[in-house]
Image: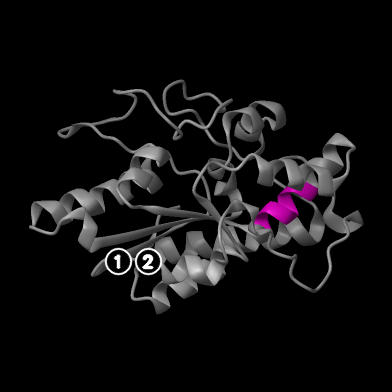
Amino acid sequence: MENSDNELFTNRRDFLGKMMLGATAFGLPSFASLPLHAEAPAVTTSGGEDPDAWINSIKGKHRLVLDVPRPHAIYPFAWAKIFLLTNEATGVPEKDCGVVVVLRHDAIPYAMKDELWAKYKLGEVFKAEDPLTKAPATRNPFWQPKEGDFKVPGVGNVNIGINELQASGVMFCVCNMALTVYSAVVAQQMGVEAEEVKKEWIAGLLPGIQIVPSGIWAISRAQEKNCGYCFAG
C-alpha cells in the first residue's frame, strides 16, 4: 500500500509539474503561454447527455467505478470484464451490476476514434502501446478489437473491447478538463488553434462516451451513487 501511495503521489506531482513548468513527458512546449484560466472550461455535451443525468442512470445493485488516469496495458478494460464475470460466477447477472469507467488524465485517447490516434500520434503523445505490437499505438486498440486479440493465461480469450463492454452495460466517460488541457498543448506543438483541436477531438469521440466536467468529478459522483472505487491506472 505504501508503495502504491507513493507512486500515485509521484504521478500527481508530475502532472502538476507539467502544468507549471512545461516539462512534460511528451517534450511539448511550456503551458505558460496557453490561455488557461482559473475557471473550469465549459462542458460540451455533444459527447452525450447532461453529466448529472448520466450519473443518475447508473444501474444495478453491485456498482464499481474504475479510475483510469493513464494507459496500463489491458487492465482498465480487463478489470471491468472480470468484475462482471466474477459476479456472474457467484449468481449475480450483468443486469444487477453497474460499472463506470472514468478515462482521465493520460488515458483520454481511449475515448477517441482511430483516425485521431493516427493524425495526432496519440500513442506516442500519451505513451500508449498497442497490446499486440508493443509499439506506440496508431489506433485505439480497445475499440472493436478482433476475436482473439486479448487472451489471459488460464482464462483464454476475453472480450474487453470498449464496444463489447458497452454491450454488457459498462458506462464510459472522459474528462473535459484533460481534453481541454491536452488539446491545447498538442495544438501549440502543431502551431494550430487549440479550439480547433479540441473541437475535432470531441467530434471524434467514440459512440456512447460521455463527457464529464472532470474525471475527479465523475469519480466523486459515482461514489455518491454507491459505486465502490478501484484504481485502474
Instruction: Identify the residue at the far top of this view.
Output: 133
Query: In this rendering, would 224 be left or right of 60?
Result: right
* Residue 142 coordinates in the image, percent (x, y): 44, 35
Say above or below: 15 vs 138.
below
* Residue 68 coordinates in the image, percent (x, y): 47, 54
Which residue carries the number 1 mark? 63
Which residues make up the magenta segment? 178-184
Helix, strand or loop: magenta stretch: helix
Say above or below: 133 vs 164.
above
The answer to whether the residues at label 2 and label 1 have Cβ atoms under 8 Å apart is yes
* Residue 28 coordinates in the image, percent (x, y): 79, 42
Query: In this rendering, would 176 be left or right of 57?
Result: right
Q: Give the spatial CA distance, label 2 vs label 1.
A: 8 Å
Query: In this rendering, would 64 be left or right of 11?
Result: left
Say above or below: 192 vs 173.
above
How is this picture coloured?
one colour
Residue drawn where x is 9% and y is 51% of the image: 89
Label 1 Cα neighbours within 10 Å, binned few <14 / some 14-19 / many ≥20: many
Type of amino acid at the residue the image marks with label 2: Ile
Instruction: Identify the residue at the far bottom of this view.
Output: 224
Label 2 Cα neighbours within 10 Å, binned few <14 / some 14-19 / many ≥20: many
Type of amino acid at the residue the image marks with label 1: Arg
Would you say residue 183 sits in the magenta stretch? Answer: yes
Q: Residue 105 or 47: which is nearer the viewer?
A: 47
